[in-house]
Amino acid sequence: MTISDLARELGLPQHRLRYWETRFPQLRPMQRAGQRRYYRPADVALVRRIHRLLGQEGYTIAGVQRLLAGERGGAATAAEPVPDALRRIRALLADALGADQA
């Protein structure tokens, strides 16, 4: 898949995908003649995941970098870790619900 195809599919500008290549060493699409980028299926899946983590789950670029670096080091799991802020919110809600029931 070309960079223009992927950018159009995700509704992103091409320069954002090129920027992500500089921030995430795991994202390395093939470069064909004339420096044209070709995203393989694994690259496409990674870009979709980065897009989801940044846009929908509220991760920062640094947070996604840490997440991906941890997985590369062998710490990959089937389930993605819950961000610390969400854990704190859940703990606060549990405390509040427990206080109301007491």
Image (cartoon, rainbow, N blue to C red):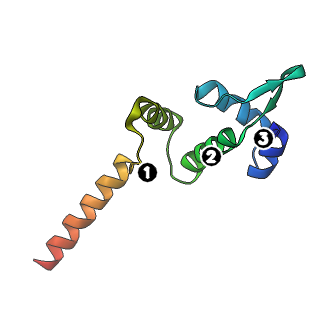
- The amino acid beneath tag 2 is His
Name the side, left or right, on which 76 lies relative to 102. Answer: right
- Viewer-side residue, 93 vs 87: 87
Q: Where is residue 102, by image quadrant? A: bottom left
- Considering depth in this image, is 3 or 102 the residue closer to the camera? 3
Q: Residues within 10 Å of mark 3 (few under 14, many from 20)?
A: few
At 21% from the left and 68% from the top, the residue drawn is 96
- Bin the neighbour count of mark 1 within 10 Å (Cα to Cα): few under 14, some 14-19, many 20 and up: few
Q: How many marks?
A: 3
Identified at 23% across, 66% down, the residue is 94
Q: Position of residue 69 (x, y in %)?
A: 46, 30
> What kind of residue is marked 3?
Pro
The disc placed on residue 57 is none
| Residue 81 as seen in the image, left or right of residue 38 | left
* Residue that protrudes farthest toward the right in the picture: 34
Q: Secondary structure at mark 3?
A: loop
Which residue is the site of mark 3?
Answer: 13
Q: Measure the C-alpha gap from mark 2 to mark 3.
A: 12 Å
Q: Report x, y in % for residue 87.
A: 31, 54
* Mark 1 element type: loop
N-terminal-most mark, 2 or 3: 3
Q: Identity of the amino acid at label 1?
A: Ala
Residue at position x 56%, y 45% in the image: 54
Which mark identifies residue 51? 2
**Which residue is labeled 1 in the image?**
78
Which residue lies at the image location 59% right of the left edge and 50% below the top edge? Answer: 52
Disc 1/disc 2 C-alpha distance (Å): 18 Å
- Residue 15: x and y in percent read 76, 33
- Sequence-wise, the earlier of marks 1 and 2 is 2
